[in-house]
Every structure is written in C-alpha cells, then in structure tokens.
Amino acid sequence: MSLRERKKQATREALRSAALRLALERGPENVRVDDIAEAAGVSPRTYNNYFSSREEAIVAGVTAERLFAADRPLIDAVVAHYTEPPPEALMLLTSSPALRACYADSTTAIEGPLADAIVARAPDADRLAAEALAAAVGAAAKVAIRHWLQAATEPLPGLVVPAGSLPDLLRAALDPLRPALGAVLT
C-alpha cells in the first residue's frame, strides 16, 4: 500500500471513529458533520470526500472494515462482521430511521474485502465468480438485517428494540449460499 493510500485509510478511520464516539456521547441527532471533521482533525470538505452524511460515517464506525481471516469459516466471519461491534453501538443504530436504513445499505461495503478473501482462500477461483458470490452474501446480509430491524418493537417513543437474534437471522439468510461458497472454496 502506498503512502497516499495509508494516509487515506488513516483519515477514513479517524473520521468513522470520531463519528461513532460522538454519536455514542451525544446521540446521533446531536452530531454535525463539522463536529466529526473537527474531532478527526480534518476540514469539512475533506470529510465530504469520504462520507456523504453523518449517518454513513456513524455506521462506518460500527461496521469498520474487518478482514475475513482464513482461520475462520467464511459464513462465521460474515456473521461476526455484523455482530461483533459493541452492543451499545448496535443499539445506537436502532435509535434512528436514517441510521437503520444506512446500516442495511452498508452491506455492499463487504463485497470487495469478501471477494478478496474468497480469492485468497481459493486462488484458482475466478475473480468474477468471487465478486458475484460476495455480492450474493452482501444481499443475504441486507435481507437479514432488514428482517432484524423490521421485527423491532418500539416500547418507548424513539427507542427501537430489535427482535430476534441477528446472528441466527444472518445464518438463515446465508445458508442457501453454502453450496455455492463450498463449490468455489473447495
């Protein structure tokens, strides 16, 4: 990775960390783009090169890119990607309709790293097939997350409590893809 790419990655990490920290401290509705940029030590213009909204930055802080380690079965790694953030971060996502929608839409962000992991695990795999499988996994994760959030109850105004187990929903949504993943990874 070039120095420029490392700097861009560090800026993105600083922005998403600041966004999540501020949202947890103040509540997402009390965080402005200018606040996130200032906390990350960049200009609002630089912020806009990385994220199009505060919700996108907050969700990126929760779903920070994780590598799909070869020592973990791929479906387990995907489930962990969506369920390993701290519980308070996951609950933050349920606090706002905009954050919920952005979280469901964030599933496309795993496609590149997941395709890379598939190719790394199966060097003979066709890149196109790896990308198609990664997109299918992202779509299945999006469906599971939507079900998790749609099944939510609203016990108090503004407080949404998701129903069911997100890991179980993810595994159920990903289960039909096991044969295709197995075909490429064996």
Image (spheres, rainbow, N blue to C red):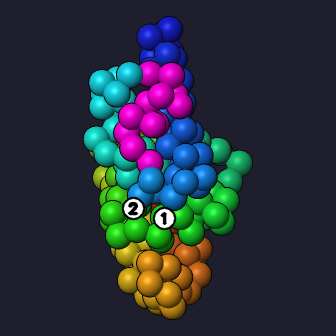
Q: How many residues crowd around disc 1 within 10 Å: few (fewer than 14), some, or many (20 or more)? A: many
Per the image, the residue denoted by label 2 is 99
Do we see residue 174 in this rendering?
A: no
Distance from the alpha carbon under mark 1 to that under mark 2: 5 Å
Q: Is residue 164 above or below residue 181?
A: below
* Mark drawn on residue 2: none
Check whether the beta carbons of the residues at disc 1 and disc 2 lie within 8 A of each other.
Answer: yes
Do we see residue 150 in this rendering?
A: yes
Residue 57 position within the rendered picture, expressed as x and y whole percent measured from the top left: 42, 44
Could you tell me what secondary structure mostly forms the magenta stretch? helix
Residue 36 position within the rendered picture, expressed as x and y whole percent measured from the top left: 46, 37
Q: Nearer the viewer, residue 15 or 1?
A: 15
5 magenta-colored: no
Q: Is residue 163 above or below residue 43?
A: below
Q: Which residues are magenta?
A: 31-42
Q: Residue at x 50, y 43 (%)?
A: 19
Residue 86 position within the rendered picture, expressed as x and y whole percent measured from the top left: 67, 59
Per the image, the residue denoted by label 1 is 93
Q: Nearer the viewer, residue 84 or 180?
A: 84
Lower position in the chain sequence, tag 1 or tag 2: 1
Q: Is residue 122 above or below residue 42?
A: below
Q: Residue furthest top?
A: 3
Q: Is residue 3 above or below residue 85?
A: above
